[in-house]
Amino acid sequence: MRKKRFALVGMATVAGIGLAVTALGTPSSGVLSAPVVARASFGERVSIKFRVGRETLKVRRAADTVMQQIVIGPGGTTGWHSHPGPVVVLIKAGTLSFVSSEDETCTPTDYTAGEAFIDSGQGHVHIAHNLSATENVELWATYFDVPEGGAFRIDAPDPGTCL
C-alpha cells in the first residue's frame, strides 16, 4: 500500500512539473499553417551523423522522421522551443530570423529563400521570427530522431535573454 501511494505521488509530481513547463512555454503567433506532410519510421536500425562546422551531431538509433511545411505571416514567431533530434530546414520564401538561446546578444541569423540550415535539436532552445511587415516566410522542415509516434516540437520557456 505504501509503495502504491509513493508511486501515485511520484506520478502526480511528474505530471505537475510537465504542466508547469507547458504553462511556461512561449506559444507561436502568426503561424498561418503548419501541416505535417509526411511521417515515417525506419524499418531497420539507422544511425545518422551531421557535421555542421566543427560540431558533429549524432543520432545513434533514429526513430521517426517527420516532414512539415510551415508558413509564418508578417511579424509572426515560432515561440521558444526545441526538438528531440536534428532538423534540416529549407527556406522556400521570405527571410527567417533564427535566434539561439545560447547567444546572449540575441543576434538573429537570417536565412533567405533558397538557403538551408541545420538546427542541432537535442534540447537546443531557439526561436524564429518573420520580421517582414509584408511577406510570408515559408519553410520546410525535416525532423530526425523523433520518438516513435511522439512530438517533434517541445515548447520551452523564454530564457529571458532576449526581448
Image (spheres, helix red, strand yellow):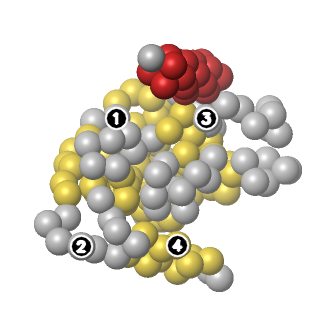
The answer to which image quadrant residue 90 occupies is: bottom left
Q: Residue 45 carries which label?
A: 2
Q: Residue 57 carries which label?
A: 4
The amino acid pointed to by label 2 is: Arg
x, y percent for residue 160: 81, 34
The amino acid pointed to by label 1 is: Ala
Helix, strand or loop at label 3? It is loop
Cα distance between the residues tagged 4 and 2: 17 Å
Cα distance between the residues tagged 2 and 3: 30 Å
The answer to whether any part of residue 7 appears in the image is: yes
Image quadrant for the C terminus?
Answer: top right
Q: What is the tally of numbered marks visible in this picture?
A: 4
Image quadrant for the N terminus?
Answer: top left
- Give the residue drawn at x 33%, y 41%: 150
Of badges 4 and 2, the one in the foreground is 2
Above or below, comparing residue 75 to residue 1 in the picture: below
Q: How crowded is mark 4: few (under 14 residues within 10 Å), some or many (20 or more)?
A: some
The amino acid pointed to by label 4 is: Leu
Pick whichever of labels 4 and 3 is earlier in the sequence.
Answer: 4
Helix, strand or loop at label 4? It is strand
Helix, strand or loop at label 1? It is loop
Pick whichever of labels 2 and 3 is earlier in the sequence.
Answer: 2
Cα distance between the residues tagged 1 and 3: 18 Å
The answer to whether any part of residue 92 appears in the image is: no
Cα distance between the residues tagged 1 and 2: 29 Å
The amino acid pointed to by label 3 is: Ala
- Give the residue drawn at x 54%, y 57%: 122
Above or below, comparing residue 10 to residue 85 in the picture: above
- Residue 101 horizontal side relative to residue 144, left or right: right
| Residue 67 vs residue 3, the one in the foreground | 3
Q: Residues within 10 Å of mark 3 (few under 14, many from 20)?
A: many
